[in-house]
Image (cartoon, rainbow, N blue to C red):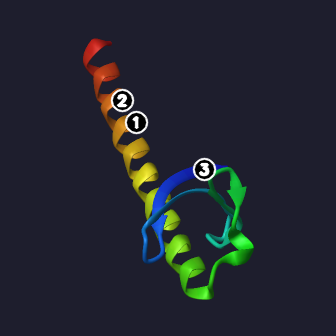
Amino acid sequence: MRTHETTIGENSASVICNYQFDDEGDLDVMQVMLAGVDIVDALTLQQWAELEDKCRAAAQADYEDTRYDARIDAYIERMTA
């Protein structure tokens, strides 16, 4: 499960999203923690969609970082071999 910190709502409440996407790229699980309480049931559909988009973007950024780091590691390994 991945974690992403973000804000939501008019007052920009700071929340922590714990989420997981399935193999087809659909959101499988999401918890939205505010002060240690899961508020997912209190979200509007618009807020849910906004958080899903933010989590998807965070997961994509993590994937790109991992891919970039792997290329750097492979390059260093070739240069030191």
Looking at the rendered structure, the kind of residue marked 2 is: Ala
Q: Secondary structure at mark 3?
A: strand
Position in image of residue 54 (x %, y %) = 47, 67
Q: Could you tell me if the residues under marks 1 and 2 are in contact, i.e. CB atoms within 8 Å?
A: yes
- Residue placed farthest to the front in the image? 11
- Residue 41: quarter of image: bottom right
Disc assigned to residue 20: none
* Pointer 1 local density, CA inside 10 Å: few below 14, some 14–19, many at least 20: few
Relative to 59, say whether 73 is above or below: above
Relative to 66, say whether 48 is above or below: below
Q: Secondary structure at mark 1?
A: helix
Relative to 11, say whether 70 is above or below: above
Disc assigned to residue 70: 1
Q: Which residue is mark 3?
A: 2
Cα distance in 3D space between marks 3 and 2: 25 Å
- Residue 47: quarter of image: bottom right
Position in image of residue 11 (x %, y %) = 43, 71
Tell me which residue sits at (39%, 51%) in the image.
Answer: 64
Q: Nearer the viewer, residue 2 or 7?
A: 7
Q: Which residue is mark 2?
A: 74
